[in-house]
Amino acid sequence: MFCLCRAYCMMKTSGSCVRVYQDRSIIDMERWELKPLRNEAWQHMLSQQRTIFPFWFQVVWCFWLIGLFSCCIGINVYDMVMEGNFIIATIAIGFDGLGLIMWITFVIINFIRYKPVGNEVKGESRVVSYFYMEQIQQFLSELCIYPQLCISCMLLLTNYNTISGIPFYLCSVSLVFVLSCRLCTIVKIRRFITVFYFRLMLFAIGSFAVVSLWLATLIVYTWPSSFHSLDILPEVASRSILCIFILCNNPLNTVMFYIAHLYEITLQSGVNIMKMNPERFENTNRIMTRLTQETPSFHKNMYSMASAKYGILLYFWICPLFIMVGVCYKSLFVSTNYSSDFSDEHRMAVLLALAGATNLIVNAKTSLLSCSGHFTCLVIVGLFFLCVTVSAVFLALIYAPLLIWVVIAVCLGYPN
């Protein structure tokens, strides 16, 4: 009985480990003071920051993407007519068609919303901010380029020719150009992000390197030549999962970067408000003093984990990566469509591992927070099984002699 009570106490203690990242004072401060502070700083930045590039550049970029997707549609139609892979060509035409429609719409919106510099309205909301629309343009460019780039990568080794290679080269150049625009944007707004400027710059460059490695991995995972054999279904699944992961990787990691660095962003928001709005200096300085001096170092480093909505996102961030790597490894070593030389599969496995490791390194803080959440759960589960095991051992030691006497009595024919 004592052991059961002790096990219950240990379970109750281990259950409190779930709250190790939480601090009620931080949660209340985040809800009532810090979140409104970040929103106010964001609105102030949008009201002062004009677009990084001139209007004509944005329109030319839109027309470039319209021409790119039109060219890709023409090449995919040509490939379909010349008896290429009908399914892949149809998927590519669908993605390119959506990109074409979106960018035609974007060009029209840019023309309608354009106003000369002297006619700009100060204090515009985040939804209609020119700077905000410019950042959306960069992310939408990536999301439209990735599908065609993934399909081009899958066709490089299986059905490569000069015409089929054109979408790959054009999309690659466009992706590099998007990276250049993003780096230029970070440099231009560095006065608003001085606290995490260097980290954001490294993250942008590292994200491009991660995407390049995933695309290289997709190239060596050649698409199956036939869809009628059940043996290639795992390969189709692995490549599809890899394509979806490439499409979602950079937007997801960008969101996770800002969540993981929420403490630094909050500090930067306070600094921005004190610079741009002197009337709020005293109140903002009081909030920043409480945040920096009264918050323990542990909660500063694990600040995002204190809130459930951010902690859950950080906890599950690493799961898609492990699922994708696991499925690809299973397809790689079970597949019968690769060469008999096992060293080729090893080279592909090394490239896949390198891409996954680089993703973890580039998102270092996000990886740390995600792993810390999993480690805490493992500790709780481990303590639970330890309590159950110890209790079972003590119960066995207490009742084992009685059980032995019962067995002996049964064997001797008692009570007969």
Image: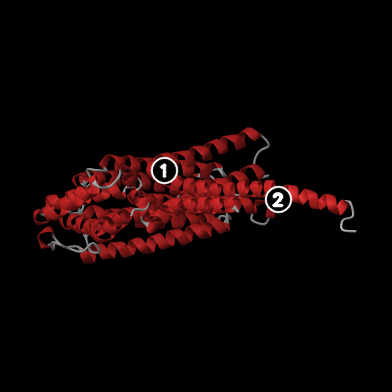
Looking at the image, which is closer to me, 189 or 274?
A: 274
Residue at image point 19% right, 53% down: 287
Residue that carries the numbered disc 1 in the rendered image? 368
Q: Quadrant of residue 280?
A: bottom left
Q: Is residue 163 shown above or below 279?
A: above
Which element type, helix, strand or loop, lies under badge 2?
helix
- Asked whether the viewer can see residue 370, the reply is yes
Looking at the image, which is closer to me, 326 or 216?
A: 326
Position of the N terminus by quadrant = bottom right
Which element type, helix, strand or loop, lies under badge 1?
helix
Amino acid type, mark 1? Leu
Residue that carries the numbered disc 2 in the rendered image? 399
Q: Give me the C-alpha separation between circle 1 and circle 2.
A: 46 Å
Amino acid type, mark 2? Tyr
Q: Where is residue 68 drawn, in percent x and y? A: 38, 53
Looking at the image, which is closer to me, 157 or 287?
A: 287
In the orientation shown, which residue stands out farthest toward the bottom?
112
